[in-house]
Amino acid sequence: MQDHAKKELFENVSVPRALATLAVPTIISQLINLAYNIVDAFFIGRTGNSYMMAATTLALTLTMMNVAFSNLFGIGGGSLVARLMGQKRLDEARRVSAFSVLSCLCFGVFYSVLIGLFLEPLLFFLGASAETIGYAKQYTMFVIVFSSVPSLLSLTLGHLLRNAGYSSKASFGLSGGGILNILLDPLFMFVILPRGQEVAGAAAATLLSNIAACAYLLYAYHKASDEAPLSLSRQDAAGIGRRNLREFFAVGVPSAILTGLFDVANICVNILASAHSDYVLAAMGIVMKVERIPNGINVGICQGMMPLVAYNYASGDRERMRTVIRTARWAGLLISAGGILMLELLAVPAVRLFLSTAGGDAAGAMLTVTFAARFLRVRCLASPVQFLNYNSSYCMQAMGNGKFTMLHAAVRELGVYIPLMFLLDRLLGEIGLAWALPVGEGISAVFALLLVAAALRGKKERS
């Protein structure tokens, strides 16, 4: 009965309703999951300490690498699972899912050890100063070194559940971790640990939240495996087969590179911002957190869209696939327009949520808020074209077109955004660093739409 309902959702339910069924829980999960970093920043901002805020900004780039690696296993495996389901090759889908989870576990251990060995020089490379290095080490030790395994597993399990049609279970697990983080942050920061240890308290709360989310998602994944082609068996993982292994990496590697290059761009932003001052770095960190709210909604739409595109691509229903893409595209553009209006009107109140000017270094906090409001009003203009880039990338991943996904990622970050960042920063100063985002994303969006059109034409010709 459950399998029939999933088949109906993918094949026959009206596109707006099917997209809403998969995307709404994912959007909610994205928004609540933002709490992992946003809530930390919010409570750290109550101290009025710009150095603490700058330190968590540095750690955010390493946190984003967790997302990149989870895309390798979660999107690479999840997209393939959805396509195999569309082709009714359920035993192969089961083997792919097992390979995704167990490979993610092994890689998470390796990544944690590697970061732990080179933590301090890495943080200085990312832009840490003598004032921020202590806080950055505290935060990164808990959130990356100790937490990478549960964090990577949670994200990977979420992708696999979502692509198998269990979007609500995935969203509940990831959202539950975010809610727990909201509850634990003030407890650890202001009650359990002494004054001055707020960064360590926020990081410890995030670690415990990640562990709890991972435990639930493992349970949900195990239960779903009774009905869906999902597995944790080492025997299944070992039997994945060369063809599926190639298809796994054909999507997973470009997806990881896409997010990894996005993180490289953020590293460049941090290095350039810290060259101006720690206040500019802290301000840019606040902006990156605020702008993730509309971006999180748009990524949720794309993640909800992806299983529908992948399934109908594999089953040959090209008209339904195109309707899904168009519907998702219009929804994202409308949300982006609303996000611009909101952030332009509420830029100052939005950034003040993340840094108090009433205590600590009030003068430094005021300067940080001023920078952040200016940057936010510029960078929020990127939202519509940024969504078109997300939408195009997820479409190409869903169709298994790793070559176009990787080409888009390379052009978007290495060919356009990062060079513009250095050029405009040199010409216009720190405000040029902010303008690089909308200009770069606009150029990349045109290229992305051309790639999707070419991918769809290629599919039509092959058919």
Image (tube, rainbow, N blue to C red):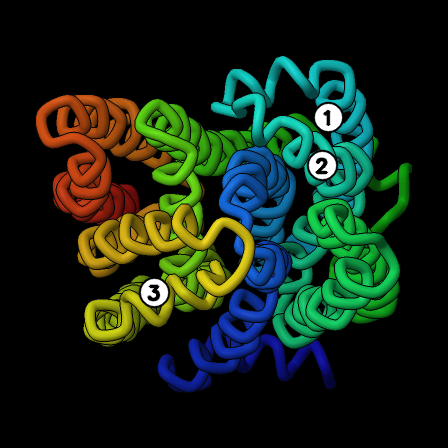
**Inter-mark Cα distance, 3 to 2:** 38 Å
Find residue 385 and report its image quarter: bottom left
User: What crowding class fits label 1: few (fewer than 14 Cα within 10 Å), some (14-19), or many (20 or more)?
Assistant: some
**Inter-mark Cα distance, 3 to 1:** 37 Å
Q: Residue at x 68, y 30 (%)?
A: 134
Query: Which residue in the protein does label 1 denote?
Result: 111
Can residue 341 be spotted in the picture?
Answer: yes
Judged from this view, the residue extending furthest toward the left is 427
Q: Against 76, is 24 above or below?
A: below
Q: Secondary structure at mark 1?
A: helix
Q: Amino acid at mark 2?
A: Ile
Q: Amino acid at mark 3?
A: Met
Query: Which residue in the protein does label 3 denote?
Result: 321
User: Is the residue under label 2 in contact with that under label 3 (CB below 8 Å)?
Assistant: no
For the residues carrying marks 2 and 1, which lies nearer the camera in this image?
A: 2
- Image position, residue 286 (x, y; %): 42, 52
Could you tell whether 328 is left or right of 264 in the image?
A: left
Residue 288, numbered circle: none
Q: Against 272, is 202 above or below?
A: below
Residue 144, numbered circle: 2
